[in-house]
Amino acid sequence: MKILVTVKRVSDPEAKLKIKPDGLWIQTEGVKFVVNPFDEIAVEEALRIKEKQTGEVVVVSVGDKVVTEQIRAALAMGADRGIFVNYAGSYDSYDIANILAKIVEQEKPDIIILGKQAVDDDMGQAGFMLAELLGYPQAAFASKVEITDDKKKAKVTREIDGGLEVKEVELPCIITADLRLNTPRYASLPNIMKAKQKPVKELTVESLGVAVKPRVTVKKLSEPPKRKGGVKVESVQDLVSKLKTEAKVI
Amino acid sequence: MIFADKEEYIKLRNEVHKFNLKELAPVADESDEKEAFPVSVLKNAGVLGYVGPHLPEQYGGMGDYYAKAVVYEENCRVCFGYNLSLNASDLIFANNIARHGTEEQRQKYLPGVIKGEKIGCWALTEPDAGSDALSIRTTWKKDGNHYIINGRKTFITNAPIADFFIVIARKPDSIKAEGGCAFILERGMEGLSTGQPFKKLGGRCSPTGEIVLEDVRISKEYLLGKEGSGFKDMFSSLDIERAYTPLSSIGIAQSCLDEAILYAKQRKQFGQYISEFQLIQEKLAVMSAELEVARRYVYHLIELMVMGKRITKEASIAKLFASDMVNRAAREAIQIMGGYGYMREYKVERYFRDAKLLEIGAGTSEIQKLIIARELLK
């Protein structure tokens, strides 16, 4: 079974970020970059499926040279090989879906797993768009994935309001990983050392025949408003009335 | 390029730190308070290959001394005591087995230690023999094909929790290094007992204690190395251990600096962050300068050791300077944090207590000075 997983390079969720003077993106100097946490969950799930079914886990990332760090990080977790699409310009979710669709045509994986969204821009669209472009069935926000015994379908559990939904999708399919799907492993020392030797194929968007033309552009970033201090209330009656009239929660 | 700057070791450093923050940091304070070794962390680390990476591959290691250095430093950044016990097991105990043991002994003792399932210790120090190693009074005598060992060891890291022990003993009436033997003992052997862990200032989650040997009778499969080679083997392994020791100082000092910076950027006095005061900035700058100089020298020392160079003087220089440096760093970190730094709730209080051992254990600062001078005046 061949599984394709996407990894995006994002700023460390723990990092304190500053906005660039032009207001269009964050300052990247001195900021630590990591694998998008949802993509890490996707890699972990792919590895678990591989460990049960045998096969191959291929990781793909799009960006400039630095994203190979994140590909290596996935290889150190245990993925088998990487595909690096060298593209330094700006892009939107649809461009990424187009690039991924070409990779899928080349690689013909049985399952494609993506993080449900990247924690930097929180778009959360690439998975859906990819499914549409390929005409593949999709199961988004997976909290549990099982492959049927005949290896022809995936049974995917999703957390929905007030309960769980179980979907069955035919392979090849698109799955996007939600937070509680699994806990990603730490890279073991032997795997970290092996990662260096694993092959990473470099491609360009031109060689894939994709013309990148973002339809969505960032106009402005701003810091979240500073939290205002609370107020002290004199009595319970006061509190209840404020909850009713001001907070409107009861 | 120095090993620590290579991509794979940077990756290893990040991963071990991530593991330690999630698995070790949450139990570090409690382990210190209860003076209990966090066994489950060791087992998880073993699964990931973070225990004994320098040991030979056929027993589960990677034969990678650099990886050991990275893990060593990162462990000390989070919990010095944890590393102290780990080090006694996978570096001192296991390395002696790997270097001087028979094939049977290696197969018997190394895999368990590397998996983090078994704990080893190494015992030389006695109530009346510390820096003067050759003055030990633990004795062995022959009884047919067996040895009988008697004596008492003290200040032994891991003695209360170890499964395996290497014990150094001498033949009665032998002089200097003659008649020295190393024996491998196992918990449960008749005549071997260990005492309660000692109450200590620092490194408190690493149990330290006594070993009492009363007519411990063992066959010759338990002799490590040759009869009479005990002290010689010990001294030949010492350089490897001595190369790693200063990394403890680097790890603890890094955390002192990190905590002090974090605090200085958050604490406001007289209407401004204390990081804006030049006297605080001076402390941070000096801490960082001393730390980085020490760090690079210690990495250099590790590389010399891996190359097989004689590092007697260099190891002493590194140990002396780094242990001095970390004690200053811990003191300054507390000074920057004031009353908060003095409280057990803040981690620098533990770092301050942990740092002191580095001027004492594995050769006191005074002994290091003597070694350096002896090498200079040869």
Image (spheres, coloured by chain):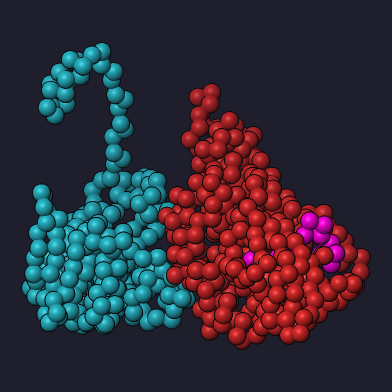
Chain colours: A cyan, B red
Horizontal and vertical percent for residue A143?
19, 60
Taking B54 as reference, is A176 above or below it?
A: above
Image coordinates of residue A33 in percent, x first then y, are 39, 58
In the depicted view, which residue is nearer to us: B162 or A132? B162
Q: Residue, x 76% and y 67% (percent of image)? A: B150
- Give x and y (percent) for residue B241: 69, 68
Instruction: Give percent across and percent down for residue A111.
Output: 18, 75
**Going by the image, does A174 lie left or right of B259?**
left
In this view, A93 is above or below B286: below
In the picture, which quadrant includes the N terminus of chain B? bottom right
Query: Residue at position x 25%, y 57% from top?
Result: A179
**In the foreground, B67 or B26:** B26
- Give the residue displayed 35% in from the left and 45% down from the top: A19
Question: Is the magenta region chiefly helix, strand or loop?
Answer: loop
Q: Is residue B55 left or right of residue A12?
A: right
Quarter holding the C terminus of chain B is bottom right
Image-quadrant location for residue B190: bottom right
Q: How many marks?
A: 0
* Magenta stretch in the rendered image: B121-135
Residue A81 vs B313, above or below: the answer is below
Q: Is residue B116 covered in magenta?
A: no
